[in-house]
Image (cartoon, rainbow, N blue to C red):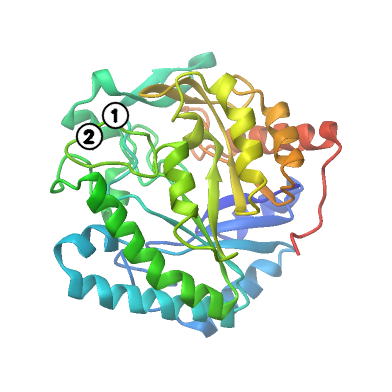
Amino acid sequence: MYISEQLLNPDDRRLRLSTQLGVQHVVLDNRGTELVSATGGVSEWDATKLRDYRQWVEGFGLELDVFALDVGSILLDSLTDIDSAKKQRAMLAQNIQKAADAGITCLKYNVQMVGITRTGLKPGRGGAKNSGFVYAEYSATDDQKHSYWGVGYPSNQEEGGSASAMLCGQKMAREVPPATEKAGWDAIEFLVEGLVPAADKAGVRLACHPHDPAYPVGGLNGIEHVVGSADGIRKFLALSPSKNHGLNFCQGTVAEMFKEPGKAMIPVIEEFASTGRIFMVHFRNIRGGYLDFQEVFPDEGDVDMFEAIMAYRRGGYAGPLCPDHVPVSEIDDGRERFMSFALGYTRGLLQAAGVWSTAPRN
């Protein structure tokens, strides 16, 4: 296993910092930029520009492991405007091929119908603030203030950045029409049926992020998070036997699915690692559990992160661990210090476990 750092549209300075921290692999999210989707949602890609961008990244001595595929609002659209959804799906299939033409071999995507729901910031150690979701405290106002798109970390220090979620074509949980469990699965099957054949043809792996957070039985504001449980993840994987149909296994998100993640997560990690369908891992920790949790520093959560690494190893996983979602603080505006801590902590665990490698997956 090795570290691949997640970055949001990095500039020269940020990539230089990554290399100085010992990072050799990156996972990049450029949604909301001219490169992939300047106005948000599904947009046509240019293979030449993608290739040039990849080569620019490689010029820093970094390998581009995974690139974000913006699926926009296609899931909701498949339920309310099927013609638009079919056009978007066809363009996404073309973008998968263009990614392959550009030398990109893995794309991550999200099946959120709404933004990543959070209810507030909780006090963390030393005055840091932890993003959290407490269902009993849910309100539309808090949803608007604290929810975010969730692929890297909130784009705003005081709020989750719902504007970013809107830019990316996502909606917030308070402002969408109801989507039942059946409708949720229908939408995801619609997407998978269109994208996986394109991925197989192009030789590109598709890494899907589970629903974050797990919603209560019956959903939240009428929206069901069908890939918000271990059984939901199993059902998602069963939608296609393709070796290119897999997971961005967000360890923190999966932990949010259990009342006692400290007990549940180690066997669950080993189970999904053994499928060979984990293409990348969001390596983060939480305190609490189902419907009541905070995102904390990786060393202070309820899941034993060393044992998690050992479980990935027992399951045969040998890919990247990507530190994810760290607390916020007014003394670390860009969260570069906090992310640097997470990078060093993760590397130390990998070395202690005897599984540290700088080799690429292939």
**Mark 1 and mark 2: span between their CA atoms?**
7 Å
Task: Look at the image and tell me whether residue 104 can be seen.
Answer: yes
Q: Amino acid at mark 2?
A: Leu
On the rendered image, what quadrant is the C terminus found in? Answer: bottom right
Residue at 63% across / 31% down in the picture? 267
Q: Amino acid at mark 1?
A: Pro
Q: Secondary structure at mark 1?
A: loop
Q: Residue under label 2, please give it.
A: 220
Residue at 71% across / 27% down in the picture? 307
Q: Are marks 1 and 2 in contact (CB under 8 Å)?
A: yes
Q: Is residue 84 left or right of residue 34?
A: left
Residue at 49% across / 35% down in the picture? 254
Graded by Cα atoms within 10 Å as few (under 14), some (14 to 19) or many (20 or more), the crowding at tag 1 reads some
Which numbered dot is residue 98? Answer: none
**Residue 262 picture quarter:** top right
Q: Residue under label 1, please give it.
A: 216
Residue at 67% across / 28% down in the picture? 305
Q: Is residue 302 above or below residue 326?
A: above
Q: Is residue 120 left or right of residue 322?
A: left
Q: Position of residue 16 (x, y in %)?
A: 68, 55
**Residue 322 picture quarter:** top right
Q: Is residue 361 above or below residue 329?
A: below
Q: Secondary structure at mark 2?
A: loop
Report the residue that reaches farthest toward the right.
Answer: 354
Graded by Cα atoms within 10 Å as few (under 14), some (14 to 19) or many (20 or more), the crowding at tag 2 reads some
Q: Position of residue 140 (x, y in %)?
A: 17, 32
The number of numbered discs placed on residues in the rendered structure image is 2
Q: Is residue 168 above or below residue 304?
A: below
Q: Nearer the viewer, residue 192 or 157?
A: 192
Q: Position of residue 80 (x, y in %)?
A: 14, 62
Q: Position of residue 339 (x, y in %)?
A: 60, 37
